[in-house]
Image (spheres, grey):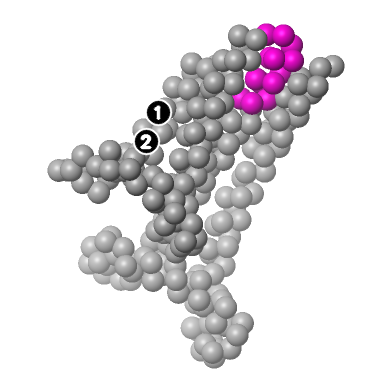
Amino acid sequence: MDPLIIAGQYLIFAAQIIGGLAWFVYIGIVVAVVALLVSRYVIDALRLNPFNRIVHGLMRPADALLGNMRQSRFYYPLRRALNFDPAVLMVLFATAIACYVVSLVIHYLLMLMSGLGRSLTAFGAGSLFSGARYAVGTILLAVIFYLLSLMLVVFAYWIFGLFRRASYRALERIGPLLRIFEFGGAFAGWSFLILGIALSFAASAVQMIFLS
């Protein structure tokens, strides 16, 4: 069998395995966040020494999560509407949104691997036109995947305070694109969301035209 066909089949198989394991990534994110919140509650309830190294190590990430929520523009309106501190609920909602964003990035990664695998398989089988079409689609998806990955890094910092340095670099990269989608008026401040929607439409179009 042609080596290109073998390589393409391995890539497609690897994409299928990653797709099957992706669910555990989402579960891991939820479990980690809930464990941090529960540990923070237990520490407060038992009045453990906050200067203890282990206790401090558990409190610090949980406090960072709750602190980020309390600095959000949605915090005080929600607190007035609900009449209690909504920071924990906001962390859980943010976790759900983060899992959804991660699922999108993984989905496009799988599309990228599958497209490359199909391209190699087509070239190995002697179908140059199909191989070239899949290759063009894969390259376009790679660009979209790169931009979405940058957005994911920025989003992780905004929500959870993670990857501070990487988020600043990522924001420098996608900043010009965000300015393009800053329409002002009623859409002021929504450029990040609009860019994400535009990239999703672009990915769907690439998939339909080049990878179908």
User: Where is residue 100 drawn, in percent x and y?
Assistant: 48, 45
x then y, percent, for residue 205 = 44, 22
Residue shown at 41%/46% (left/top)? 173
SS majority, magenta:
helix
Q: Quadrant of residue 161?
A: bottom left
- Asked if 66 appears above or below 27 in the picture, the reply is below
Q: Dot 2 corresponds to which residue?
A: 197
**Residue that carries the numbered disc 1 in the rendered image:** 201
Residue 151's place in the image compared with 111, above or below, is below
For this rendering, which residue is in front, 26 or 106? 106
Residue at mark 2 to residue at mark 1: CA–CA distance: 6 Å
Question: Pointer 1: residues within 10 angstroms few (<14), some, or many (20+)?
Answer: few
Q: Is residue 96 visible?
A: no
Crowdedness of circle 2 by 10 Å Cα count: few (<14), some, many (20+)?
few
The amino acid beneath tag 2 is Ile
Q: Is residue 53 left or right of residue 83?
A: right
Q: In which quarter of the image is residue 177?
A: top left
Can residue 4 be seen by looking at this rendering?
A: yes
Image quadrant for the C terminus?
top right
> Which amino acid lies under the numbered mark 1 shown in the image of this protein?
Phe
Q: Give the range drawn in magenta.
A: 115-127
- Give coordinates of residue 179: x percent, y percent: 28, 43
Looking at the image, which residue is at 56% across and 76% down? 58
- Residue 86 vs residue 139, the one in the foreground: 139
